[in-house]
């Protein structure tokens, strides 16, 4: 009897499935798409919807605006133009996303409420190539030739843990420094950046000061990661991990991206710069010192001395920016600490030809600087931004990107739709950054 009832239930389920299939067969043949891919609007409203699904299914679509203050969208897909600017409206349905680019024109008549569909490019609107869903398909896990102590796991944020976020890179052997030790491109090589007792500083970090990520006698250092056998580097990238100056997430930010960039032909270096209680300025001098070491040994590593980029994640990006704004080229430690004694390495210009701002900006912790006059003082190089739409600093990233672009500084970006603050090399952006770097380096050689 139980078996008979079970069979009846199965038959009913199959019949129900068949009914649903035939009911939706016509819709299934239709390709799902937004009724409009781009809009140029004045202040007013417009309705978006997904073609190819029923009215009932329309209620299951969720809507989101990348810039609600410019163009908002209701849960039913009605877009309202609020003020001049650009936005992207995203419709999410059954794990897929469909986007419409919006441009709200300035100086229009609010009573007009006109709109015009446009299939062409629309000035500063985020392109579909810039805004993407993000993917872990190409995220590079720990390479097979990495020593065990450099194992960072899969590189995907789904595998992150407190262990990886707080793990420290191996320190240099003995007293090996960038000045007293020859660069060895064939091995993982960690070298202290400053000679013992001669690091420029204005902060007094003493033995009785506890509770910091680093011990009071911490010495900043750089770790060189060797290329794969048989590969000739296209250039060098120095990476600074984030951590709000409280810690360095090398095994989630810098090391993972360094490994990925290596696969695309770049010699990589991870910089362990000074954290709190030290200042942003002291950390910037650590970055400058590392750049000088890399530039001095460019021939030994096998790349052009002008093919050097810096990049950082969150606070690490701010640190890269501080270096570029105030401590690059011929500036040495005496600019901050009059007691610092310059050495042979200080004769090498600390020059970088490109910058990568990964969920970061030029400015200070949590505050991006939007002043074109201030930014112009840094004579900034081409800059590549990567950030997610769910980042709490998203609006600042968007704004600074536009300020930098309006200043005439070559700039590019990848925006991961729905991604948060902090994803390291995950999300599918590294290949784009590598291609961009190669292009920038080629131009710097010509100049």
Image: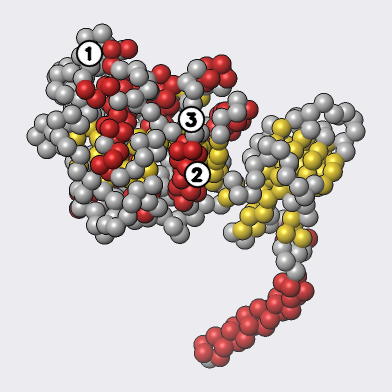
Most extreme residue toward the left is 174
Where is residue 98 drawn, in percent x and y? 67, 54
Look at the picture and state if 373 lies above or below 63.
above
Real-space CA distance between mark 1 and mark 2, rounded to the nearest whole angstrom: 38 Å
State if disc 3 and disc 2 touch (CB < 8 Å).
no
Nearer-N-terminus badge (2/3):
3
Most extreme residue toward the top is 338
- Callout 1 secondary element: loop
Nearer-N-terminus badge (1/3):
1
| Residue bearing the label numbered 2 | 439
- Callout 2 secondary element: helix
- Callout 3 secondary element: loop
Circle 2 Cα neighbour tier, 10 Å, few/some/many (<14 / 14–19 / ≥20): few
State if disc 2 and disc 1 touch (CB < 8 Å).
no
Number of marks? 3
Tag shown at residue 170? none
| Residue bearing the label numbered 1 | 340
Where is residue 406 drawn, in percent x and y? 63, 28
Tag shown at residue 381? 3
Residue drawn at x 47%, y 42% is 442
Real-space CA distance between mark 1 and mark 3, rounded to the nearest whole angstrom: 28 Å
Observer-nearest of 39 and 405: 405
Residue drawn at x 48%, y 30% is 381
Look at the picture and state if 361 lies above or below 26.
above
Residue drawn at x 15%, y 34% is 181
Real-space CA distance between mark 2 and mark 3, rounded to the nearest whole angstrom: 13 Å
Observer-nearest of 24 and 367: 367
Residue drawn at x 68%, y 40% is 125
Where is residue 340 drawn, in percent x and y? 22, 13
């Amino acid at each position: 009897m139980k078996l008979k009832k079970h069979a009846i239930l199965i038959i009913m389920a199959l019949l129900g499935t068949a009914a649903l299939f035939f009911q939706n067969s016509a819709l299934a043949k239709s390709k799902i798409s937004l009724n409009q891919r781009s809009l140029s609007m004045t202040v007013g409203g417009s309705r978006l919807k997904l073609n190819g699904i029923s009215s009932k299914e329309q209620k299951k679509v969720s809507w989101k605006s990348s810039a609600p203050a410019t163009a908002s969208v209701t849960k039913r897909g009605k877009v309202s133009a609020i003020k001049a600017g650009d936005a992207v409206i995203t419709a999410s349905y059954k794990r897929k996303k469909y986007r419409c680019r919006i441009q709200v024109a300035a100086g229009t008549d609010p009573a007009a409420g006109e709109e015009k569909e446009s299939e062409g490019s629309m000035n500063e609107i985020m392109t579909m190539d810039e805004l993407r869903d993000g993917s872990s398909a190409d995220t590079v896990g720990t390479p097979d030739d990495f020593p065990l102590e450099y194992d960072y796991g899969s590189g995907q944020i789904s595998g992150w843990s407190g262990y990886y976020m707080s793990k420290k890179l191996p320190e240099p052997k003995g007293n090996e420094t960038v000045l007293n030790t020859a660069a060895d491109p064939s091995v993982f090589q960690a070298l202290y950046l400053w000679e013992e007792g001669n690091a420029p500083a204005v902060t007094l970090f003493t033995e009785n000061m506890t509770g910091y990520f680093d011990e009071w006698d911490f010495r900043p250092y750089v770790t060189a990661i060797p290329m794969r056998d048989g590969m000739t580097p296209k250039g060098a990238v120095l990476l600074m991990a984030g951590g709000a100056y409280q810690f360095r997430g090398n095994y989630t930010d810098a090391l993972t991206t360094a490994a990925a960039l290596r696969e695309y032909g770049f010699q990589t270096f991870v910089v362990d710069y000074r954290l709190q209680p030290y200042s942003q300025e002291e950390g910037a001098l650590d970055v400058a010192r590392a750049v000088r070491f890399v530039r001095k040994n460019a021939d030994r590593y096998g790349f052009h001395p002008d093919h050097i980029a810096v990049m950082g994640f969150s606070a690490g990006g701010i640190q890269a920016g501080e270096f570029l704004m105030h401590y690059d080229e011929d500036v040495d430690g005496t600019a901050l600490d009059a007691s610092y004694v310059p050495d042979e390495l200080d004769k090498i210009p600390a020059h970088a030809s490109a910058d990568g701002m990964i969920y970061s900006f030029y400015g200070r912790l949590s505050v991006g600087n939007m002043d074109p006059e201030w930014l112009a003082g840094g004579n900034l190089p081409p800059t590549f931004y990567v950030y997610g739409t769910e980042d709490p600093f998203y609006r600042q990233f968007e704004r600074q990107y536009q300020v930098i672009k309006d200043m005439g500084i070559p700039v590019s970006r990848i925006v991961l739709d729905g991604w948060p603050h902090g994803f390291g090399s995950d999300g599918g952006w590294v290949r784009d950054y590598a291609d961009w770097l190669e292009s920038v380096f080629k131009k710097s050689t010509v100049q």
